[in-house]
Image (cartoon, rainbow, N blue to C red):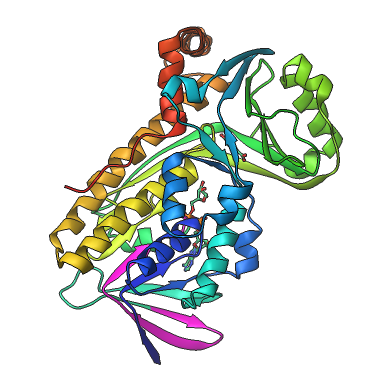
Amino acid sequence: MKTIKTQVAIIGAGPSGLLLGQLLWKQGISNIILERVTGEYVLGRIRAGILEQGFVELVREAGVADRLDSEGEVHEGIDISINGHRHRVDLKQLTGGDVVVCYGQVDITRDLMEARADAGLESYYEVSNVVLNNVKSGTLPSVSFEQGGQKLELLCDYIAGCDGFYGVSRQTIPKHIRIEHERVYPFGWLGLLSDTPPVSEELIYCKHERGFALASRRSATRSRYYIQVSLDDKVEDWSDDAFWLEFKKRLPADAADALVTGPSIEKSIAPLRSFVCEPMQYGKLFLVGDAAHIVPPTGAKGLNLAASDVATLYKIMTRVYKNKDTACIEQYSEIALRRVWNGERFSWWMSNMLHKFDTTDSDDVDGQTFKRFMESELGYYLGSENGRRVLAEQYVGLPYEELK
Ligand code: APR
Ligand code: PHB
């Protein structure tokens, strides 16, 4: 068996693992990434692309923001449409200057992969049988894995589990320690990507009697649109024409008239889930991003919560290696989870207000009360400047917490 060594072993080359690796390297902390699939496969996964300011600054700190700064679109507001009537949430004005940046997750991932290759940092792709050893024993941890039929062992000081919802890292925390909170939603999002000019400069979140829809974008020539669908629906049930027809019905009339349709480049259905694993640290193992938590996409918090975990772990690792302060690792879970729960709550709140629920709250007697509560909730928040400010403050993202 071949043995290799590093300071921080990173499991997973998604945005969490790649960003963490780059930041650690900038501080002189060595790291090796292990990834189950190929780089091309990772880049084939279409995800959201609304970045909070904290995320953008972190990518700048990692020295990988050239393309993000030149090609990312600054969005100063969003529209929320209720049965065709638009309400603008002026993020910039309401928050005293904060905005979000529209730049696809695939693009960030590609930038980070290229920067890692340029820096000559080691990554092992297409690995299998990844096992995390000694994460909470007196001896140093290690990760055993296989690549191309060869068995390898990676010796390290710490392990960052950045391996997504289906990874092995979370499962390494013993069941009696791990608490998993979960809520599933009775619908999914059908997403369509197309090389058509987007229908709007800013995102339009649409609450509609027929169900939720979202008009998003990737660039001036690429659109990303979504509609709420039943969990029983299959992508094959939805031709491009059927998608466009339904999407148009849920948009405000002026947007529906202006909509340019075209063939899809990608089309997929994603279920909606709220999930949090506590704690996020166990011995020398830290869970980061989707490995520890999932949010429904309403509000675009998935990638941004991954980034705040990375920011916290990066500060901790820097203190560990620069100041020889190992006690600070105990702060990770508490700091990360505070922000995670807020993001979870915001995404759940937005999802509740904007979707059509066929199955109602089990406490409803008439089957309509939850629906009416949510209509009133959305009406209140959009109708009051204070309400819009609450929404705006969370959409642009709360500040990252410092270590004690
Ligand atoms: N060994 C090595 N790598 C693994 C393993 C394993 N056993 N299991 C999974 N992986 C890899 C996956 O192939 C994937 O490339 O870990 C990576 C995890 O990446 P993501 O799922 O993108 O998770 P993360 O980096 O935390 O990014 C969070 O992605 O899902 C969105 O909404 C989410 O935008 C957010 C972002
Ligand atoms: C996207 O562009 O894919 C996107 C944007 C905002 C969301 C969800 C998804 O809330």
Q: Is residue 322 left or right of residue 163?
A: left
Res 358 seen here? no
Looking at the image, is 238 positioned above or below residue 288?
A: above
Looking at the image, is 387 positioned above or below residue 73?
A: above
Q: Is residue 152 left or right of residue 80?
A: left
> Residue at 55% of width from left, 66% of height from top?
113
Q: Nearer the viewer, residue 381 or 315?
A: 315
Res 235 seen here? yes
Looking at the image, is 59 positioned above or below residue 159?
A: above
The image shows residue 286 at horizontal and vertical percentages of 31, 59
> Residue at 63% of width from left, 36% of height from top?
189
Q: How many marks?
A: 0
The image shows residue 334 at horizontal and vertical percentages of 23, 45
Identify the magenta region.
144-165
Q: Quadrant of ligand 2?
A: top right
Q: Nearer the viewer, residue 371 or 384?
A: 384
The image shows residue 219 at horizontal and vertical percentages of 70, 42
The majority secondary structure of the magenta stretch comes to strand
> Residue at 37% of width from left, 84% of height from top?
153
The residue positioned farthest toward the bottom in the image shown: 1
Q: Is residue 355 magenta?
A: no
Looking at the image, is 128 positioned above or below residue 73?
A: below
The image shows residue 48 at horizontal and vertical percentages of 58, 43
The N terminus lies in quadrant: bottom left
Q: Is residue 151 magenta?
A: yes
Q: Is residue 207 left or right of residue 176?
A: right
> Residue at 66% of width from left, 17% of height from top?
208
